[in-house]
Image (spheres, helix red, strand yellow):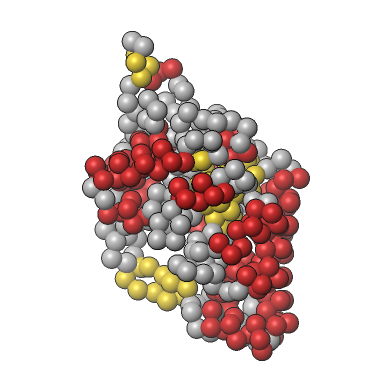
Amino acid sequence: MNPSHFSGGEMQKISLPLKNPWPDAKRFCDVIRGNVIPEKPPLVELIINPEIVSKIIETRLGGKWVFPDDIESSKVYLRNLIECWYRLGYDYIRIGGSISRAAGGGLDYPVKRRVTDDTAELTFGKRQWAEEGTGVIASWKDFESYPWPSAEKVNLFPYEFVSENLPEGMGMFVCPASGVLEVVADLLGYQGLSYALYDQPDLVEAVFNRVGENLLGFYKRVVGLKNLCGFFQGDDWGFKTSTLVSPEILRKYVIPWHKKIAEVAHKNGLLYLFHCCGNIESVMEDVINEIKADAKHSFEDSIMPVAEFKKKYGRRIAVLGGIDVDVLARSSEEELRRYVREVLKACMPGGRYCLGSGNSVANYVPVENYLIMLEEGLNWGG
């Protein structure tokens, strides 16, 4: 704990943004590994939506938000992201696919999208959904003509710039694109994937392998970057009651690629943090025993509350986040503070827990509620 937060022998309540943050990426990693049981929860997040970041930058940090469209504006954009994560108390920043692509990097897969107006109070325009019908690949001809991205040609500028410009003590987790199943489902469409699994299994296997090889190739390239703590890969496998495809399909086409990526991380002393939405109870043992993920992220109370997951699996895998996004978005201050404290009370004993949203800080989450969640963590036990 930073001694500046003590006065006259009593700890003062912390409010955000922090004036003098004290990031400690090594300690964050030690908590994930179970080497340290902290008194206060490290903070964790997969995605802080850019609308939220821009609001915080301009109204709380006195900065100016910019959209990246050339090298110089990309540097400003990335510095804004670093400043936001740093001043909110995180030990790391995650540079994911959408961030890196905005700044000129990442693996880009052109796909069909369903687009509509975004009704959130904070919005940059439209909201997109994945294509559920037939995607851009439905035949071998489509496969051969598709403009496949290449891991060898990915511009690493966003990752390199962030790694070289982090405040002292801060680390970085990276991710170049959506996960194996997510990308394949985007390329084929869920309906197209469902038919192709039976009608064109060789094509399905080829698409999975091409996507998996790209992800693996990217991660091999970034090993060795300064301040790199690990990989924080997302891949949504489920919905409310089940996995989106059968456990057998996941074990055949998807899980082996995550295992290979996790092996790259672990062989290089890095962490593999795994984000996966939906009910994946049928393959949780695979996540722990086959992939050997260091941590699981994404929880929804209507599926399995984070406290229940921590009780069941917390001795075998670290637990990330869990503040249900619906609660985070719609609760009053009193309700939210009580809820967060209840989660912390259940999840902090034994360690290997970090506080954050159950999924991501979406643009419909009030900024005030987001900061309340973080402040409860920073003030826990004080």
User: Does 249 sit above or below residue 273?
Assistant: below
Number of disc labels: 0
Which residue appears at 76% of the width and 45% of the height? 267
Question: Left or right of 5: which side holds 336?
Answer: left
- Counting from the top left corner in percent of width and height, residue 24 is at 54, 30
User: Does 200 sit above or below residue 58?
Assistant: below
Question: Left or right of 84: which side holds 255?
Answer: right
- Counting from the top left corner in percent of width and height, residue 123 is at 32, 60
Q: Residue furthest right?
A: 267
Q: Residue furthest bottom?
A: 199
Which residue appears at 44% of the width and 61% of the height? 303
Which residue appears at 59% of the width and 40% of the height? 32
User: Does 126 sit above or below residue 138?
Assistant: above
- Counting from the top left corner in percent of width and height, residue 4 is at 40, 18
Locate the C terminus by quadrant: top left
Which residue appears at 65% of the width and 73% of the height? 249
Residue 32 or residue 153, whichever sits in front: 32
- Counting from the top left corner in percent of width and height, residue 352 is at 55, 39
User: Does 33 sit above or below residue 134?
Assistant: above
Residue 83 or residue 371, whichever sits in front: 371
Residue 94 or residue 144, whichever sits in front: 94
Q: Residue furthest top?
A: 8
Q: Is residue 199 visible?
A: yes
Residue 164 or residue 281, whichever sits in front: 281
